[in-house]
Amino acid sequence: MTSTFRSKLMASYLILVLLLGAGLYCYLSLNLEDSITSGTRRHLEDEARVASLMASKEIRDLRRDAPDVTGSLSRAIRARVSVIARNGEVVADSEVAPAQLGRLENHGDRPEVRQALRSGTGSAIRYSATLHTDMMYVASSFGAGGVIRLALPLSGLEQAKVQLQRTLAAALAVAVAASLLLSYILSNVNSRNLRTLSAGAARIGHGEYGTRIAVRSSDEMGELAQVMNDMAARIEQQLERISTEKNRLDAILGGMGEGVMVTDAAAVVTLVNPAFRDMFGATDQVIGKQLLEITRHPDLHTFCRQVLAGRHEEHQELTLPDGRAALVHWVPLLEGEKLRGVVAVFHDISAMKRADRIRRDFVANVSHELRTPVTVIKGYAETLLSGDLADDPARRDRFLAIIQNHAERLSSLVRDLLALSELESGELAMQPQSVLIEDAVRQAFLLVAQRAEAKGIAMEWVGNGGAASVMADRGRLDQVLINLLDNAIKYSGTGSTIRVDAAGEGDMVRVSVRDQGIGIPGKDLGRLFERFYRVDEARSRERGGTGLGLSIVKHIVQAHGGGVFVESTPGQGSVFSFTLPRANA
């Protein structure tokens, strides 16, 4: 106990020496400069008063007499002397040649000059741009509005201050060194265990929870070391468990496609996962913010408050900022009777709603497309079966032709539906090969030539002879070209011309089909490649279209890694084009 008390006493002495030394050092350092500066200012003010009296007697004309007076005064008092007119012009300066006075700034705004003109005497300390050093200025007025100013550099004061600071610092260093030495000698014998304990505690404090402190005694130090070892072991176990749980939770939340948000009882966000950030476009820090600060969706905040107030689960359907639909499942966080917050899980149901809408539209469109030919076939078949046309072979043959025409339309519709289903399923096996565009186009010309000749339409290949080959499934490429040519023939007038060309675009080749048909309104261009979409449904059915051709074209081209495009001017014709990967030479 004696040695412990001695160590504390030595430490107290050391602290006392440090405090006294530091206090004395700070006091002298802070007050010396003010004391010396004040004394120097008073001395300079006395000299300025004397100089003003001398100037009043000696200076009759400022510009003529001032230079001689400033020179003699400067030599007498060993300071810079300036004479300044009432308008601020420097008419004489002991440090500046008369020829250089015109380059000096107007001194009318100098604080010491303004103060001297106002009250007779003024002073200031500032950096001199002329002499490039800190100066003390004292000004005194004389005569009819003249000011004589004395300037003294503060370098001497700074040197005295630095010297005193060095002396004080040396004395303080000696006192501290002596105190450290004595304290070390007196306390070192009994501080070994304390240093060991301190080092171990420091390592534990820095996160090295596997550290264990050696217990070498059974006194209070030994008991403290044992307690710290037990505490480190428990902390290590707890941190391992927390880290495992956190990693597991982060992995689960990061891998979830659903957005997750957790708030406290005040609707302040405490946890979100990446999917939530993506849904609401939250790029800034959201943890610790009110829900209203993250998103301005009024229904979201209303439901959150509703769940917090009612303490029961809720389901909500809302529209996200980017237009997607989400189903939100709200669950209150309860610990016994205490409400801790709420958990919200955001399920993106946009794809589900889109699929449901597409399914409904598809069923409606297919039903609509099937109804007309089925009704026609049924009506004409009933008429034929009734026997009313047994005596009229011409009408009977015409009815049979109508039935055959609509049956072919049904067959085309079913065939296109099957083809579209294969393409959309992604299970269609493509067999890409190098295909020369010109060969494929001329082959397609042959396949639609009969329909073109029936309307007197000419088809021309205007591509250059060196058009690049493309990597494509030859059968699917033929299907694309035939569909586009067939559309061009249907909507082109008699005697018009259809031209097909191809041009390279980097790693792709663009193939364009140009007609001179009726054209397409601009409002319909964006929906042309949708299933069953028709610009003019009545005219399209008259021409025998199923409404699926362009959709099939789009899916085939996209399956090859290309794109489809359309340009049209009503009354002048249309240009349908698509791109396919260029074949390697």
Image (tube, rainbow, N blue to C red):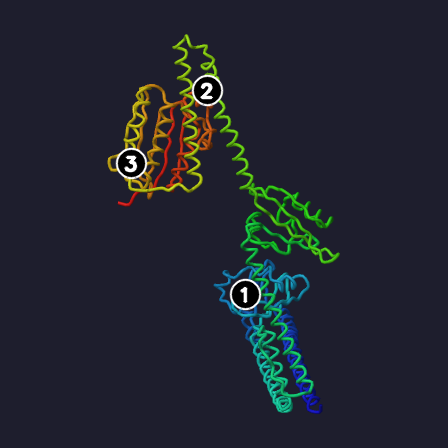
Q: Amino acid at mark 1?
A: Ala
Across and down, in percent, residue 167 comes to 59, 84
Q: Which quarter of the figure has residue 503?
A: top left
SS category of the residue bearing label 3: helix
Please identify, in this view, whether the residue under mark 2 or under mark 1 is nearer the observer: 2
Q: Which quarter of the figure has residue 465?
A: top left
Q: In this rendered view, identify the residue nearer to me: 444 or 280.
A: 444
SS category of the residue bearing label 2: helix
- The disc at residue 377 is 2
Side of 325 relative to 375 (left or right): right
Which residue occupies 60% across, 72% down? Answer: 236
Q: In this rendered view, identify the residue nearer to me: 160 or 475.
A: 475
Q: Amino acid at mark 3?
A: Ile
Badge 3, how many Cα within 10 Å: few under 14, some, many 20+? Answer: many
Q: CA distance from mark 2 to mark 3?
A: 41 Å
Q: Is residue 367 visible?
A: yes
Quadrant showing the C terminus: top left
Across and down, in percent, residue 495 comes to 32, 19
Q: Which residue is mark 1?
A: 92
Quadrant showing the N terminus: bottom right
Across and down, in percent, residue 20 comes to 68, 82
Question: Do residues under tags 3 and 1 come within 8 Å of each other at their CB atoms?
Answer: no
Side of 312 relative to 68 (left or right): right
Disc with the residue nearer the chain's start (2 vs 1): 1
Q: Amino acid at mark 2?
A: Ile
- The disc at residue 437 is 3
- The disc at residue 204 is none
Badge 2, how many Cα within 10 Å: few under 14, some, many 20+? Answer: some
Q: In this rendered view, identify the residue nearer to me: 384 or 46.
A: 384
Q: CA distance from mark 3 to mark 1?
A: 97 Å
